[in-house]
Amino acid sequence: MGGKHCCVVGCTNSSKKTGQGLNYFGFPKDAEWRSTLIAAVNRSDSGFNPDSMHICSAHFEPSCLL
């Protein structure tokens, strides 16, 4: 498979497909922020594992990115 894939429902972005245009972020360790992102991703399937998944920068406001 290779590369990073966005785990947001309906998003097809991947590092192989989009190249350098997007950044991919793992889920944070901070429990509160992690829970917020897990809820926002809206995934309940058994294959969802936030420890190994990523969210692409397309789902963040520019002001949220450093």
Image (spheres, rainbow, N blue to C red):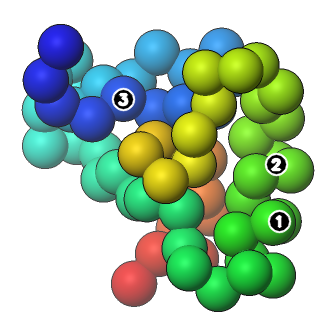
37 sits left or right of 59 in the view: right
Q: Is residue 66 left or right of residue 50?
A: left
Q: CA distance from mark 2 to mark 3?
A: 17 Å
Write down the residue under mark 3: 5
Residue at point 55%, 31% (across, down): 7
- Badge 2 marks a residue whose secondary structure is helix
Q: Quadrant of residue 27?
A: bottom right
Residue 39 showing in the rendered view? yes
- Of the residues shown, which amino acid type is indicated by label 3? His
Three-letter code for the amino acid on which mark 2 is drawn: Ala
- Rate crowding at label 2 as few (under 14), some (14 to 19) or many (20 or more) other CA atoms within 10 Å: few
Quarter containing the N terminus? top left
At mark 1, the secondary structure is helix
Residue 45 lies, in percent from the top left, at 76, 19
In the picture, the disc for residue 40 is 2
Assess disc 1: are there few (<14), some (14-19) or many (≥20) residues with their C-alpha within 10 Å of its C-alpha: few
* Residue under numbered circle 1: 36
Mark 1 and mark 3: Cα distance apart in space: 20 Å
Query: Which residue shows up at 36% across the image and 29% down it?
Result: 5
Look at 76% across and 52% down and name the residue there: 38
What residue type is disc 1 on?
Thr
